[in-house]
Image (cartoon, coloured by chain):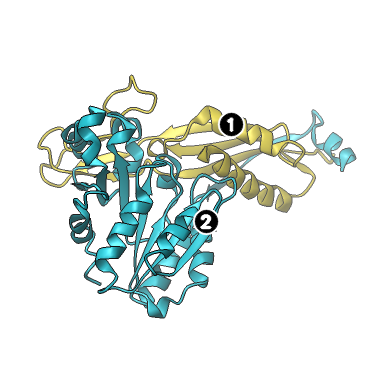
Amino acid sequence: MHEFSIATTLVNTLLDFAQKEGAESKVLEVYLRVGKLRGIAIEQLIFSYGILSKGTLLDGSKLIVEETAAEAHCHQCDFKETFQLADESFHFGIPQLSCPQCGASLDLEGGDEIVIAKVRMLRASHD
Amino acid sequence: MTKQTDVVTSAEGEVFDVELEADILKANRELAKENHENLKKFGVMTIDVMGSIGSGKTSIIKSLISILKDKRRIAVIEGDVTTTIDSDLIAEEGVPTVQVNTGKECHLDANLIKKALARMRLDQLDLIFIENVGNLICPAEFPLGSDKRLVVISVTEGPYMVVKHPMMFLQADSVAINKVDLAEIMGVNPSKLRDDIARINPRATVISTSCRSKIGIEDISSSLGLLHS
């Protein structure tokens, strides 16, 4: 459900950007980084993006999503690893904040971003 | 406009990348920070109460108000998709309420809270409960600027709601397992739910509650430090 509101913010941010770039440039591809801890269904996000971008400067552009992981660190035993979802058989997996080594609670870094990394544009040739 | 679009799609066009690094959650995060600072200035503590539909968020808030209202000046922001049913219920406790109807949205966001706070006399308050929209998924994504997060679940939602919605519990300070008086009838084991929560977030304090039997309400209050400012 929140995919739609996130897609709305995404489209509004991109439209501001596209307007500044001017009508001579067209947005072809949008590269988005989404943290795995956000629990976002990528397919729904892309679907919402397609609906919201119709009839705007973004019409026909492609949304390309890269998922980024969180790093877990235990201050008790210094255990470090890329944060794992405990059981991948669930669609979203079950994250665990208890250290697999000593059972203390883990600190997480990253994995919660939603960032437009770059936009691929097409500029008209004026030769 | 149509003509210009024809120009830019020409095969002779040049493709180029613009590195944006634009954080699209920044606006909400900054507004949440602004809310937090505003509340701090007035010394008001805020608790974001989240949980699924019908888990008993409103009843827990009502029960907390009834044991705290002699000691703290309390107000409630009620988030719902529509209707004022919950804020009417809370008003029975004699505390000010602001109803926020999101219309279509499945969660509150920092901007809606900012607008709600503008309607409140913060100088006359110690504690605000924010009841989020009933939903175990989306509210976790949108910080509001509150001090602490309380998640309310209940045994009537069955035995799997914790493992099915782990994200909600990652950021919880306290979790109430509500309606424990019905656990046996429902065939749900509250200690299994406790284990699930402890595995996901060992830092969260887990409390078994029943608003009807007045179980665990004091414990929620002390786990969130509601009597200390």
Q: Could you tell me how many numbered marks the image carries?
A: 2
Q: Residue furthest right?
A: B3
Could you say which is closer to the camera, residue B225 or residue A26? B225
Vertical position of residue B110 compared to residue A1: above or below: below
User: Pointer 2: residues within 10 angstroms few (<14), some, or many (20+)?
Assistant: some
Label 1 chain ID: A
Q: Is residue B5 left or right of residue A63?
A: right
The residue at which mark 2 appears reads as B84
The image's mark for residue B99 is none
Q: Residue furthest bottom?
A: B123
The residue at which mark 1 appears reads as A46
Q: Is residue B194 left or right of residue B92?
A: left
Q: Amino acid at mark 2?
A: Thr
Q: Position of residue A59 (x, y in %)?
A: 73, 35
Residue name at image x 29 percent, y 58 percent: B63
Residue name at image x 16 percent, y 35 percent: B191
- Element marked by disc 2: loop
Q: Amino acid at mark 1?
A: Ile
Chain A, colour shown: yellow
Labelled pair 2, 1 in contact (Cβ < 8 Å): no
Could you say which is closer to the camera, residue B48 or residue A31? B48
Q: CA distance from mark 2 to mark 1?
A: 34 Å
Q: Position of residue B30 (x, y in %)?
A: 47, 61
Write down the quadrant of residue A97 in the picture.
top left
Label 2 chain ID: B
Q: Position of residue A39 (x, y in %)?
A: 42, 36
Vertical position of residue B122 compared to residue B105: above or below: below
Residue B153 seen in the current view: yes
Chain in cyan? B
- Element marked by disc 1: helix
Residue name at image x 31 percent, y 34 percent: B156
Q: Is residue B188 left or right of residue B23?
A: left
